[in-house]
Image (cartoon, helix red, strand yellow):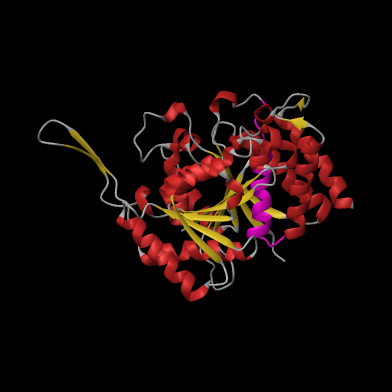
Amino acid sequence: MSKRSLLLLPGDGIGPEVMRQVRRVIDWYARKRGIEFAVEEGLVGGCSYDAHGTPLTDETMARALAVDAVLLAAVGGPKWDNLGFDKRPEAGLLRLRKEMQLFANLRPAKVFDALVDASTLKPDVVRGLDIMIVRELTGGVYFGEPRGITDLPNGERRGVNTQVYDTHEIHRVARVAFELARKRGNKVCSSEKGNVMESGLLWRQEVIALHKAEYQDVELSHMLADAAAMQLVRNPKQFDVIVTDNLFGDILSDEASMLTGSIGMLPSASLGATDANGKRKALYEPVHGSAPDIAGRDLANPIAMFLSFAMALRWSFDLQAEADILENAVENVLNTGLRTGDIMQPGMARVSTSVMADSILREMDKVAAV
């Protein structure tokens, strides 16, 4: 069998630090489980702009399209805030999503028992929380045309962005949500603003139509996006899978991430359509961002990067048991009381990025031996 191929894009800020640790996990699978990956590394974001004058080169884009999966750590930082939108680090990430046609972003929000008290919400509200937000990723207001800033005759300026969706864009992301729900709690909540936006009304109508045609066995509900934001902090365990558009998904998934106690704990997957061979383009990344204030200090939490790789093991390589090893090792280490600064609690032991990684790797040895 040919090696499974991975492109690593460490990016900016704490990205190189957490990617360095996940590289050790990749090496562990080769040494201990005989599962080898052909690994390449490239630049994206601000570091790519500094080196090449663009946040993503054509060469790196081509490599991303050729591999089985892409692991991206983080992009951005204040150093590049004054660049034009097409040169900013985030433009590299948007290009990856667009050209890889990664239309479905999966953002799990799961509360580990050991971290119940790390959440800012009451323990009884978040204990046992395990939800999935499916965000449409390549349409909507972030990509719609026309867009831009123009000067008006009266001396004022006008900023325009266009929220637009077609039927097929709604159906394909909703289909991902329904399929996920069938493997989880069998419930989907579709969220939009159909009360004031025509695009939201179309979204609701098309989700209903798809549900009626193909997924009547899955429980479907609808909730306006502002109400969903409120319910996520009031009673988040009412949800199983939430499907929503690009803009609202961006907001709701970040809100849901903080229910877990730290944005440094959560992974994500961005998926394309399945091809004739059953494969799909995929990009995996933690949701914590580049955290430039702690970059280079061995303080970052590597767990979200580890769990993003676990998602890659599941979704891109169908290595379910191997993903279990990594995820169980993470949970076991948290149960011992080790914490990075972002999830530190009274009575726990604060550790560095590298020490947390060391501990998880040692625990992987124990889990794999059982």
Q: Is residue 14 visible?
A: yes
Foreground residue, 369 or 328? 328
Q: Is residue 311 magenta?
A: yes
Region rendered in magenta? 298-319
Q: Position of residue 191 (x, y in %)?
A: 45, 54
Q: Quadrant of residue 347?
A: top right
Q: Residue furthest right?
A: 370
Q: Position of residue 283 (x, y in %)?
A: 56, 52
Residue at 28% across / 52% down in the picture? 145
x and y, in percent, of residue 98 in the image: 43, 54
369 on left or right of 261: right
Residue at the location (67% across, 32% down)? 118
Count the labels in the image.
Answer: 0
Q: Quadrant of residue 358?
A: top right
**With 167 as the anchor, is 128 left or right in this view?**
right
Residue 263 is inside the magenta segment: no
Q: Residue at x 70, y 54 (%)?
A: 37
Looking at this view, name the residue that lies furthest to the left: 153
**Residue 70 placement, left or right of 323:** left
> Which is more toward the observer, 305 or 117?
117
Vertical placement of 94 versus 100: above or below?
above
Q: From the viewer's side, name the closer residue of 166 and 207.
A: 207
**Is residue 57 visible to us here?**
no
Quadrant occupied by the N terminus: bottom right
Q: Could you tell me residue 70's position as x and y percent?
A: 58, 51
Above or below, 331 against 101 in this view is above
Q: Please say if 204 is above or below 132.
A: below
Residue at the extreme bottom: 213
Q: Nearer the viewer, residue 286 or 31?
A: 286
